[in-house]
Image (cartoon, rainbow, N blue to C red):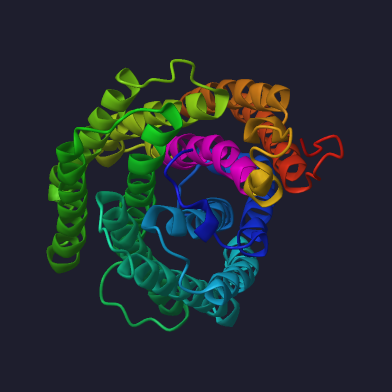
Amino acid sequence: MDNIHISKAPPLRVVIPFYATGALFFLIFNIMLLISANDLMGHYFSPHLLAIVHTAVLGWGTMVIFGAAYELLPVLCENRLYSDRLAMASYVFLLIGIVQLVPAFWLFRAGSLMIAGGGCVFIAVFFYVINVMLTAGNCQDHSLHQKFLVSSALWLLLTVTLGLCLAINLRYPFMSRNHLDIMKLHAHAGIAGWFLQLITGVSVKLVPMFLVAKATKTRWIKAAWFFQNVGLMGLLIDGHLSNSSGRDILYAAICGTGIICWMYFLNDVRLHRIKKRIDFPMKLTMSSNFFLVAALIMIPVAHYGSQTKWTIAYGILLFIGWISSIIMGQTFKTLPFIIWNEHYNSLTGKADIPLPASLYAEILLKYQNYFYFISMAVLLAGILSAQILMIQVALLMLIVTALLYVANVFKIILHKPLNNHVHR
């Protein structure tokens, strides 16, 4: 990991709570899925599925990404995080918000609990946006990955603003538009604005670094940022003004063009890498693109199809497939290095020290990947064929996947420097 400013990273107490809590929510999320297996065969707008989605998006995805972002922002922007206190406050408010929101959705009690939870999540995101904007704003060199980080933060702020408005609207109706129409805008601002652009921006910097490759085709990343934002803005603006359900596919195609540009860039990096052997975390990360492409292909089927199973499958490909595989893969690239940097960076060249990859159990990661890919195949087959037993078996395997992930994450977090790493 040459040429990265690891000395500017925040202390462990800032980032580790996000990783630890996110891992536990990943397990909770999969247990909730098993309990609600029958809901996967019904309509996507159900109390249990709303609770599960928000557990996955906020407790699992956003929680881990916040922690990784606070660690990577100083590295990518080459200056210290604007405020460690804001970062820690965002953790507290995000956790409190999730703990209130999820039961409110599960029991579908629209009122003070749901609104308070949404308000806490909004505050957490507001603190995150301030940290991102001011950390990136102090950077001397405004590069492409920073542009993605800033735009993704703004999309996240819009997403939670819409979400809070929806929570208030359920108790105190004030919106003239159909609730489901606004929910569609809320969901896609989060998927294509927050997750897609954050993942794109971070991968532009980290994938070439991890594969030891020089990124040359940066014009494709510029095009990716343009098309992703134009497609999403078109969907939201046109959808808000004129209920553009007939033009949704057009905006999806524009955004999809941005995704293709990004994938072309990543493939070029892969082909021109110096490091020929790709480790397990990067294999899992790179394979996530399969789920994203499959989800894109399913968009017209879910849009024009009359059966809700296509929409459920689309959501599973995005949340359990694309987003989860990236987070699981990058956890074992970023978290070991965070712990290694704390314990061993100062000993480089002075003592026999382990590599970051030795901090996790590779055998657990291998079995995690096996269980994960098999469970995804069985789960999708079960949903499309409406076989509840297949769905339940797949969800049991996903729980095993989550248990292996949690065990490995806490193995890294609880790592203690070994006494035999003596000074030379």
User: What residue is shown at x 61% (from left), y 59% (from top)?
Assistant: 15
- Magenta range is 315-338
Nearer the observer, 38 or 166 = 166
Dividing the picture into quadrants, the one containing residue 419 is top right
Residue 390 lies in the magenta-colored region: no
> As displayed, is residue 81 above or below residue 260?
below
User: What residue is shown at x 71% (from left), y 48% (from top)?
Assistant: 343
In the image, taking residue 227 as reference, residue 135 lies left or right, namely right
Residue 331 lies in the magenta-colored region: yes
Q: Taken as a whole, is the magenta stretch helix, strand or loop? A: helix
> As displayed, is residue 36 above or below residue 97?
above
Residue 33 appears in the figure: no
**Residue 306 placement (x, y as % from top left):** 31, 38
In the image, taking residue 385 as reference, residue 104 lies left or right, namely right
> As displayed, is residue 287 above or below residue 319?
above
**Residue 395 placement (x, y as % from top left):** 64, 33
User: What residue is shown at x 18% (from left), y 48% (from top)?
Assistant: 248
Q: Residue furthest right?
A: 419
Dividing the picture into quadrants, the one containing residue 396 is top right
Which quadrant is home to the C terminus? top right
In the image, taking residue 348 as reference, residue 122 lies left or right, namely left
User: What residue is shown at x 68% (from left), y 53% (from top)?
Assistant: 20
**Residue 118 placement (x, y as % from top left):** 50, 74
**Residue 79 placement (x, y as % from top left):** 42, 63
Residue 6 appears in the figure: yes
